[in-house]
């Protein structure tokens, strides 16, 4: 399968790193920047260099505000049965269909842990996108982490507020947790080691079981013990629950404004 990626910055590059070893997939990049790319990837700085070559899939990975200027030049580069994939946040299916009216289209909302093959990604397909196109995209998405299909653009906005913006929330939580460890007298380095490894270990345990997360919490909390004392603060008046509800609601509201 011949895949063309338009724009290969932070997110395009993160995904490409996980894709480069995939069998039966060849990647071509159009990006004006000087790039350090995996072996075997063809890089051109302008679409003119592509000649008349056509691709099975074109992935739009430029900034949303550049989409309308940049993408029309790539309509002839997509085979008649090819699929347009867009990772541009907030750039609607209607806007994409205005540029690619005759092709199947899939919108993708990845997050930055794609860099280490741990992305949580949302996928939304247009009615024209067929099973073969969805299957091909699933192969790419499995290589960068886990994915879920959603049934509307509104759901994609909601997903953006959870997993798209989620790494930012987690980094903030880690920062605040490290501050707490420093207050107890640990050095910056030790506080970071203890907190990051604790987050990683707990997240890994949660990922490896189907059991309710509350049962994991209960399994490390003895009545009257230290964890209970800490949790009493964290859960006081459901403060953390309320904070997370407000956090995701604010991000969803912003995603709707940007649509
Ligand atoms: N970063 C994230 O966490 C994230 C998460 C979800 C979705 N996304 C989406 O991913 C897309 C890319 O974001 P990003 O963070 O990867 O941005 P980025 O780092 O700025 O990457 C965009 C790339 O496109 C290149 N470019 C500029 N003009 C071009 C042209 N005419 N033709 C081809 N390539 C061109 C840029 O080159 P120059 O640097 O030389 O301008 C840059 O390498 C956005 O639409 C964003 O909404 C990003």
Image (cartoon, grey):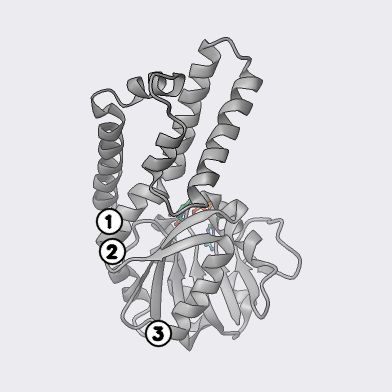
* Cα–Cα span, label 1 and label 2: 9 Å
Disc 2 to disc 3: CB gap under 8 Å: no
Q: Which residue is mark 2?
A: 153
Residue 158 shows in the view: yes
Q: Are marks 1 and 3 in contact (CB under 8 Å)?
A: no
Residue at mark 1 to residue at mark 3: CA–CA distance = 25 Å
User: 34 or 57, which is in the foreground?
Assistant: 57
Ligand 1 within 8 Å, label 3 CB:
no
Q: Quadrant of residue 222?
A: top left
- Residue depicted at x 45% and y 36%: 219
Q: Earlier in the sequence, mark 2 or mark 3?
A: 3
Residue underneath mark 1:
259
Q: Residue furthest front?
A: 223
Specify few, some or many for label 3: CA neighbours under 10 Å numbering under 14, 14-19, or 20 or more: some
Q: Residue furthest bottom?
A: 80
- Residue 247 appears left or right of 114: left
| The one of 234 and 190 positioned closer to us in this rendering | 234
Between 240 and 173, the one nearer to me in the picture: 240
Q: Secondary structure at mark 2?
A: helix
Q: Which percent across, then down, holds residue 35?
A: 68, 56
Mark 3 secondary-structure assignment: loop
Ligand 1 has an atom within 8 Å of the beta carbon of the residue at disc 1: no
Whole-percent x, y for residue 139 in the image: 55, 73
Residue at horizontal 28 percent and vertical 70 percent from the top: 94
In the rendered image, residue 102, in percent from the top left (x then y), is placed at 36, 85
Q: Which residue is mark 3?
A: 130
| Circle 1/circle 2 CB separation < 8 Å | yes
Q: Residues within 10 Å of mark 1 (few under 14, many from 20)?
A: few
Decide: is 89 above or below 190. below
Estimate how packed mark 2 is, as few (under 14), some (14 to 19) or many (20 or more) residues with alpha carbons within 10 Å.
some
Vertical comparison of 45 with 74: above or below: above
> Who comes first in sequence, dot 1 or dot 2?
2
């Amino acid at each position: 399968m011949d895949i063309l990626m338009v724009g290969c910055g932070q997110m395009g590059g993160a995904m490409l790193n996980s894709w480069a070893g995939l069998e039966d997939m060849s990647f071509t990049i159009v990006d004006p920047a000087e790039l350090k790319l995996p072996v075997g990837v063809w890089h051109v700085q302008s679409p003119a260099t592509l000649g008349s070559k056509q691709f099975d899939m074109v992935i739009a990975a430029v900034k949303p505000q550049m989409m309308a200027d940049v993408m029309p030049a790539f309509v002839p580069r997509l085979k008649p049965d090819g699929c347009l994939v867009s990772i541009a946040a907030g750039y609607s299916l209607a806007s994409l269909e205005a540029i690619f009216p005759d092709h199947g289209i899939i919108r993708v909302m990845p997050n930055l842990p794609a860099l280490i093959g741990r992305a949580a990604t949302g996928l939304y397909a247009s009615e024209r996108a067929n099973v073969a196109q969805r299957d091909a995209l699933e192969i790419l998405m499995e290589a960068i982490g886990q994915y879920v299909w959603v049934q509307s653009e509104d759901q994609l906005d909601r997903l953006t507020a959870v997993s798209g913006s989620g790494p930012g929330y987690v980094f903030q939580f880690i920062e605040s947790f490290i501050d707490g460890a420093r207050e107890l007298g640990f050095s910056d380095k030790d506080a970071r080691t203890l907190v990051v490894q604790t987050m990683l270990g707990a997240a890994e345990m949660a990922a490896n079981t189907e059991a309710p997360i509350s049962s994991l919490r209960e399994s490390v909390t003895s009545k009257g013990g230290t964890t209970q004392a800490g949790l009493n603060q964290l859960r006081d008046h459901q403060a953390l629950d309320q904070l997370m509800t407000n956090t995701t609601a604010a991000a969803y509201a912003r995603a709707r404004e940007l649509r």
